[in-house]
Amino acid sequence: MNVTRLLMRTALAGLIALSANVMARAEAPSVVVSVKPLHAIAAAVMAGVAMPRLLVKGFASPHNYALRPSDAAALNDADVVVWIGENFELFLSKPLDALAGKARVVTLNEMIGDGEDPHLWLDPDHAREIARRVGDALSDLDPDNRDRYALNEAGFSKRLEELDEALRKILAPIVDMPYLVFHDAYGAFERRYGLAMVGAVTINPIQKPGVKRVAAIRQTIRETGARCLFGEPQFTPALLGTLIEGSAARIAILDPLGATLAPGPETYFTLMRNLAGDLRDCLTAN
């Protein structure tokens, strides 16, 4: 009887250990992503496995974001952190070292090499590279789901080809039409699609432009006949109205971060189509 009980206990302990081992292997890496467009790309790669955690939500801006206690906890538990770099998410520079020391940090500025323009995701080719980098990190940490990540990445890449073709069609009528933006955030998008941005009010949206800069922008609007001056959901100061006074330009909104969009794997595609559509609608309006 004692022998039987011992064997049963040993077998039960073995089953418990095996179950725990299987659960440990099945648990997906904990992924934390700085901003919504990058989160959308990571979510597409992780589809069917898990959902990454997003830090900067809603109308918040990475330029002046302050970490919350829940964000700090997420970084502390993270296996992977995806961000552009300290020139974009300055709020993450010190916390990454202090809180996410054990995490694999995917720093996209270093990997893609476009440090002067941190809004990398606005070029579909960059989005493809971001997906590949995220997929590589996940596959290394979670080999049980490597095939799933690879399949998701391939599907995402295929959809990027379709998106690129659609964006070119949307933007074709406005490639020569001059416009200005409040925040110099669209270089990757403009270079890819040959758009005619003729000026930005500021490079850093949290720094108010000086008198000389305001005068220069007003002159640019007059000389180029710019049709639109675009603000953003996070940054549309009253100053924009002053800048277009006496001109035919109108004020509209561009949203490079998807402030009004729900986080998820579809967000990247919606964001990019909205961006192209909003540019076209303002520039072609009568």
Image: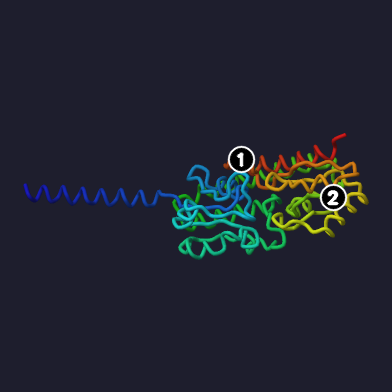
Picture mark count: 2
- Disc number for residue 266: 1
Residue 161 vs residue 190, the one in the foreground? 190
Side (left or right) of 49 relative to 280: left
Residue visible at 91% across and 44% down?
A: 246
Side (left or right) of 75 relative to 87: left
Callout 2 secondary element: strand
Q: Nearer the viewer, mark 2 or mark 1?
A: 2
* Amino acid, disc 1: Glu
Where on the picture, by quarter, is residue 210? bottom right
- Above or below residue 149? Residue 105 is below
Badge 1, how many Cα within 10 Å: few under 14, some, many 20+? some
Side (left or right) of 170 relative to 43: right
Callout 1 secondary element: loop
Question: Coloured how?
Answer: rainbow
Residue visible at 73% across and 53% down?
A: 185
* Amino acid, disc 2: Ala
Query: Percent from the top left, x then y, of residue 147?
Result: 50, 49
Query: Percent from the top left, x then y, of residue 86?
Result: 62, 62
The residue that mark 2 highlights is: 196
- First in sequence: mark 2 vs mark 1: 2
Q: CA distance from mark 2 to mark 1?
A: 28 Å
Residue 10 vs residue 204, the one in the foreground? 204
Residue visible at 83% across and 42% down?
A: 172
Side (left or right) of 26 relative to 117: left
**Quadrant assignment for the C terminus:** top right
Residue 57 vs residue 111, the one in the foreground? 57
